[in-house]
Image (cartoon, helix red, strand yellow):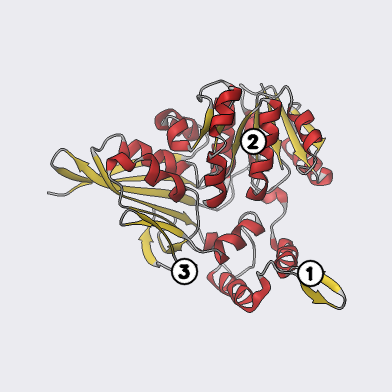
């Protein structure tokens, strides 16, 4: 089994490379990236004979298709802006596809390729990072056990930093988009845009995380779950996170910059040069991303002191009984789920376990076998139910 990881030298995709290289079902893992120096750093750290490095530019369509040809699956770990062109390359090469999310609007555009993928006899699973991905399967697990579904509420709790150190937890462009763009929610049977950093509520997560302030954020789960379970009567769906696992003080500083126009995409003239404020903001903040090895699990030492729990609460009825399912997937191994989850999806795609077409996770993947595979990597899912007497 040969799997291509586009952007495999990136902060989240390198975790997928590590997972795939350690899986017995995988024979070859290709780190396909522009940054060969960082790709070599990742490969040397993981130290597996399965890893191969290839330079690739996703804007070079012929080169990308040539690289993909003959592979069993493509895991796109780059920023979601590339999802559509990489999918087009996969169509041309006849290769299965998965990614880490499309931030709602891109996911919707990707789903429009379903007929073409089905005609080509290949499959795609969209949004298979830790979230989106795991919440979609949590929601399916609960929805399959209910006659009706009233609401699907997703809470992504990340252990906050001990200090106000300005470190980003994943891709700078994606976090900035989630901070600046209006979150979409499904309310009273309609999709609605809300204000960024709104809808605050305190939510209790499993130890060692505890109580965290949660706010709305734009995410792909909301784009698909209300449609997938429409026949169950879904009236409400949202996604909330706690400052993307960053310091509140740091997020507020970035928000001020955005309010003053530094998140803008219209070019401005500066000393005769045309510059997009957002490009400059991305570039300057990229210096605050931790070293690549901070994201990889230490091979023979204790995992980092970092915790994350993804919780999906699904409220509905079974017969005359009102029931709320709480699905909580917890890990104390840092960003690991974001790399392991798409890695599992890529393997399942390569094994032919997903029907042709383009699908959200809750349609394509069976929850229980997926959760079992996560458990093998110390990512545990617990289910509790609350019944209204």
Residue drawn 71% across the image and 27% down it: 93
Q: Does residue 174 sit above or below 296 in this rendering?
A: below
Q: Secondary structure at mark 1?
A: strand
- Residue 255 figure quarter: bottom right
Frontmost of labels 3 and 2 is 3
Can residue 103 be seen in the rendering of this structure? no
Q: Earlier in the sequence, mark 1 or mark 3?
A: 3
Tags 1 and 2 in contact by the CB under 8 Å rule?
no
Of residues 348 and 161, the one drawn nearer to the viewer in this rendering? 348
Can residue 73 be seen in the rendering of this structure? yes
Q: Secondary structure at mark 2?
A: strand
Q: Earlier in the sequence, mark 1 or mark 2?
A: 2
Of residues 41 and 311, the one drawn nearer to the viewer in this rendering? 311
Q: Does residue 22 sit above or below 287 in this rendering?
A: above
Of residues 204 and 300, the one drawn nearer to the viewer in this rendering? 204
**Whole-Å distance between the Cαs marked 1 and 3?**
27 Å
Residue drawn 66% across the image and 50% down it: 81
Residue drawn 67% across the image and 25% down it: 94
Residue drawn 38% across the image and 48% down it: 312
Q: Earlier in the sequence, mark 3 or mark 2?
A: 2
Q: Position of residue 11 (x, y in %)?
A: 67, 49
Numbered label attached to residue 298: none
Residue marked by disc 2: 75
Q: Does residue 91 sit above or below 257 in this rendering?
A: above
Q: Residues within 10 Å of mark 1 (few under 14, many from 20)?
A: some
Residue marked by disc 3: 195
- Residue 181 figure quarter: bottom right
Q: Residues within 10 Å of mark 2 (few under 14, many from 20)?
A: many
Residue marked by disc 1: 275
**Whole-Å distance between the Cαs marked 1 and 2?**
32 Å
Q: Position of residue 237 (x, y in %)?
A: 37, 53
Q: Position of residue 179 (x, y in %)?
A: 56, 65
């Amino acid at each position: 089994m040969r799997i291509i990881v586009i952007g495999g030298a990136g902060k989240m995709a390198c975790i997928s490379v590590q997972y795939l290289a350690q899986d017995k079902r995988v024979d070859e893992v290709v780190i396909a990236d522009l940054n060969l120096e960082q790709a070599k750093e990742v490969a040397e750290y993981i130290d597996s004979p399965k890893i191969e490095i290839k330079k690739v530019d996703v804007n070079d369509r012929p080169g990308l298709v040539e690289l993909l040809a003959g592979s069993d699956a493509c895991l796109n770990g780059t920023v979601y802006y590339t999802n559509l062109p990489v999918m087009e390359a996969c169509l041309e090469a006849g290769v299965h596809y998965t990614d880490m999310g499309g931030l709602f609007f891109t996911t919707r555009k990707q789903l429009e390729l379903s007929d073409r993928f089905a005609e080509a006899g290949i499959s795609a699973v969209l949004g298979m990072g830790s979230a989106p991905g795991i919440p979609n399967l949590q929601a399916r697990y609960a929805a399959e056990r209910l006659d009706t579904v009233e609401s699907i509420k997703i809470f992504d709790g990340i252990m906050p930093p001990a200090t106000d150190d300005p470190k980003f937890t994943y891709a700078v462009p994606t976090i900035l988009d989630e901070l600046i763009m209006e979150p979409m929610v499904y309310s009273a049977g309609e999709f609605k845009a809300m204000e960024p950093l709104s809808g605050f509520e305190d939510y209790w997560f499993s130890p060692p995380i505890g109580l965290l302030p949660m706010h709305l954020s734009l995410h792909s789960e909301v784009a698909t779950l209300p449609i997938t379970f429409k026949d169950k009567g879904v009236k409400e769906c949202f996604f909330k996170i706690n400052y993307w696992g960053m310091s509140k003080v740091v997020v507020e500083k970035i928000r001020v910059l955005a309010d003053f126009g530094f998140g803008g995409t219209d070019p401005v003239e500066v000393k005769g040069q045309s510059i997009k404020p957002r490009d400059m903001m991305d570039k300057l903040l990229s210096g605050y991303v931790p070293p690549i090895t901070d994201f990889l699990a230490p091979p023979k030492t204790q995992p980092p002191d970092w915790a994350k729990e993804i919780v999906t609460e699904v409220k509905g009825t079974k017969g005359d009984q009102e029931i709320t399912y709480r699905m909580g997937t917890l890990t104390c191994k840092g960003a690991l789920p974001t790399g392991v989850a798409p890695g599992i999806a890529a393997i399942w795609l390569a094994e032919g376990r997903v029907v042709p077409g383009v699908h959200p996770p809750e349609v394509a993947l069976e929850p229980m076998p997926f959760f079992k595979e996560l458990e093998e990597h110390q990512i545990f899912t617990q289910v509790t139910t609350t019944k209204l007497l």
